[in-house]
Image (cartoon, rainbow, N blue to C red):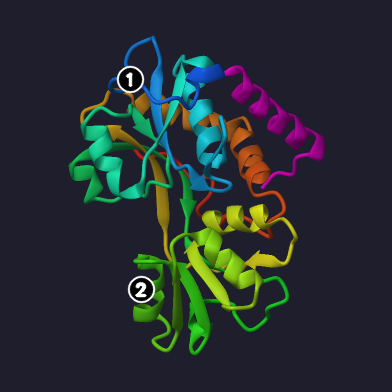
Amino acid sequence: MRKHTMGLLAMAAASTLALSACGGAEVGGEPEGGASEGGDGITIGIKYDQPGLGLQDGAEYTGFDVDVARYVANELGYSEDQITFKETPSANRESMLQNGDVDMIFATYSITDERKEVIDFAGPYFVAGQDLLVAADNTDITGPEDLEGKNLCSVTGSTSAEKIKTDYAEGVQLLERPGYAECVTALAAGQVDAVTTDDIILAGLSAANGDGNLKVVGAPFSEERYGVGLPKGSDRCEDINAAITKMIDDGTWEELVAANTEGADYTPNADLNPPTPDACA
């Protein structure tokens, strides 16, 4: 990745915060009806509970997904005060697009053939991979194959933990928690040896922890292509892909990744990132 000065990152972060503040009550507010179409505004689905990706903090919305959404919306002709952010839990993403509750979704939304049967995607704008978060001084765990007999934390019902148990380490001891923040707390307290989910999510959690005592192992063992969810038949795919390409070419993509994972020992997989958007169907 190209190196950017700390001053540039600080300016980028300050700019993002300033834009959030300028949005007023409309930014992040829930629309009274369905999603906003046309020139009046746009409703964008994000996560509210993922530090570094999509996080609600009072009236502010922060994270890489949120910043990418702002950039793309601006390229589509929407000013900051025309954006309404709306929470889109993973289980509800397809239905919210189908029902017109949101116009598009930026929410660690992996592009899959199954999902493309009912919705459309633009992108990808990031390629994540399942990875492990461990203590910064841990030298025993360099990948999922090292988890045999170790204690692993993941969210209740997570497919990430099941993948490790099925494909890599049958003897792993699984601790389930309702959210990844609770897993990070358990890891910091020494109650578990590792936490698993997508690498950039782990990086955001590590950065939010703030004391530098955690690290992402950096050996991803899956490929999760984060796309922009769109209603089936949307005519916005080409314009969104053009915006993503511009964001990558002008250096903003790298700045946003760095700013939202600052403090975490993390570098995106350089073989897969930054990605080239797929051709629109």
Q: Is residue 113 left or right of residue 66?
A: left
Mark 2 vs mark 1: in front: 1
Q: Residue at x 66, y 38 (%)?
A: 255
Task: List the single residue furthest toward the left.
Answer: 117
> Do we see residue 79 in this rendering?
no
Choose the circle earlier in sequence order: 2 or 1.
1
Q: Where's residue 67, x and y in %?
A: 55, 33
Inspect the image, locate mark 2, and give the three-letter code of the amino acid beneath it: Glu
Mark drawn on residue 162? 2
Which element is circle 2 on? helix
Q: Nearer the viewer, residue 84 or 238?
A: 84
Q: Main secondary structure of the magenta part?
A: helix
Q: Which residue is mark 1?
A: 32
Q: Residue at x 36, y 22 (%)?
A: 31
Mark drawn on residue 127? none
Label 2 and label 1: CA atoms lie apart by 39 Å
In the displayed structure, 29 sits above or below 261; it is above
Q: Which residues are magenta?
A: 1-23
